[in-house]
Amino acid sequence: MFTNLIQANLTTRVLGREIEHYTWTKSTNEDAWKLIESGANEGTLVITDKQTAGKGRAGRIWVSVPGKSLTTSLILTPGINSRLAGWFPLLTGIAIVDALKELGLNTKLKWPNDIMVYGKKLGGILCESKIQGSILEWVIIGIGLNINEHENELPADLKATSFLIESSSSIQRELVLAKILNNLEWLYNTLKENRDTKILLEFWTERCNHVNKKVKFEADNDTQEGIFVGINNDGAAIMNSNGKETIYTSGDIHIETYTKRLAYISKNKL
């Protein structure tokens, strides 16, 4: 990736103005923590062309294709109440969906951190943080997106897709990243300066693919079926199961609607 091409497309004041580029690395999130220890500034971006041990949520591995995936981590110093930590993957998701829409691809969000295209995963977000007392001192936002991969380059056992597969055209990863950062800076400042999550909640809800839909929710080794009502002011999920609402700060959502939708479309085409 070319750092000058990223910065040439930035409209930000802080995000991405300092970039650390590695030809290869185990994990950009791990690199970001090391940079924090050595005095990195807010907005510092870590990018790589090859990531060998990318992190996913809950200890999972994120698989990336050298030179084709977008793998990056961003360093932030929010200085806000730690109860708002759950908003960072949500804000990043909004920024990604809007950036991809600007580039001609419609995607949706799946709580808490997935970027989806008709039931297939195009990317994910992993946020890590350091809390001092009740203050969110550091946040690292890790982003992994499938950009220019062909179908045979993605794991066969995963329902994955890429920008190239969905749009039938390749794109510069640097441009995608710059647009994400441009969108994210405004969202981040809105959370940091105003502490008012109402407008952010509305933005996220508009871009989510399963609000008020029946889902399976896995959390704490338990699976519940119910309606995903939405998110609260802290970014936590609200589930309604048999008339009882439960709040979740972590977990996995499984949606069956896309399978049914595609089957319905196929049937009506016959």
Image (cartoon, grey):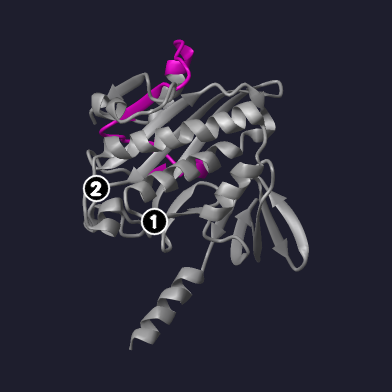
Which residue does the image show at 62% across and 46% down from the upper left?
A: 201
The mark closer to the camera, 1 or 2, is 1
Secondary structure of the residue carrying numbered label 2: loop
Percent across and percent down for residue 259 are 45, 72
Q: Quadrant of the C terminus?
A: bottom left
Tell me, yes or no, if residue 25 can be seen here.
no
Amino acid residing under circle 1: Asn
According to the picture, the residue beneath numbered tag 2 turns out to be: 148
Question: Which residue, given by chain and number where applicable, does mark 1 sit on?
Answer: 106
Q: Nearer the viewer, residue 187 or 138?
A: 187
Q: Is residue 54 left or right of residue 194?
A: left
Residue 36 placement (x, y as % from top left): 47, 16
Q: Is the N terminus in the top left, top right, bottom left or bottom right quadrant? A: top left
Looking at the image, is mark 1 or mark 2 earlier in the sequence?
1
Span shown in magenta: 35-62
| Label 1 residue SS | loop
- Residue 196 vertical position relative to residue 202 in the rendered view, above or below: above
Please report the residue visible at 41 percent of the width from the left and 33 percent of the height from the top: 181
Tell me if I can see residue 264 in this picture: yes
Q: Which mark is residue 149?
A: none
Name the spot of residue 136 as percent of width and height, x first. 63, 25
User: Residue at horizontal 54%, vertical 31%?
Assistant: 188
Q: Are discs 1 and 2 less than 8 Å apart at CB?
A: no
Kindly report the distance in space between the C-alpha atoms of the residues bearing marks 1 and 2: 16 Å
Residue 236 x/y as whole percent:
66, 46
**Is residue 47 found inside the magenta-colored segment of the image?**
yes
Splitting the image into 4 quarters, where does residue 86 fall? Answer: top right
Kind of residue at disc 2: Asn
Residue that extends furthest to the right in the rendered view of this protein: 244
The local crowd at label 2, few if under 14, some if 14 to 19, many if 20 or more residues have their Cα within 10 Å, is many
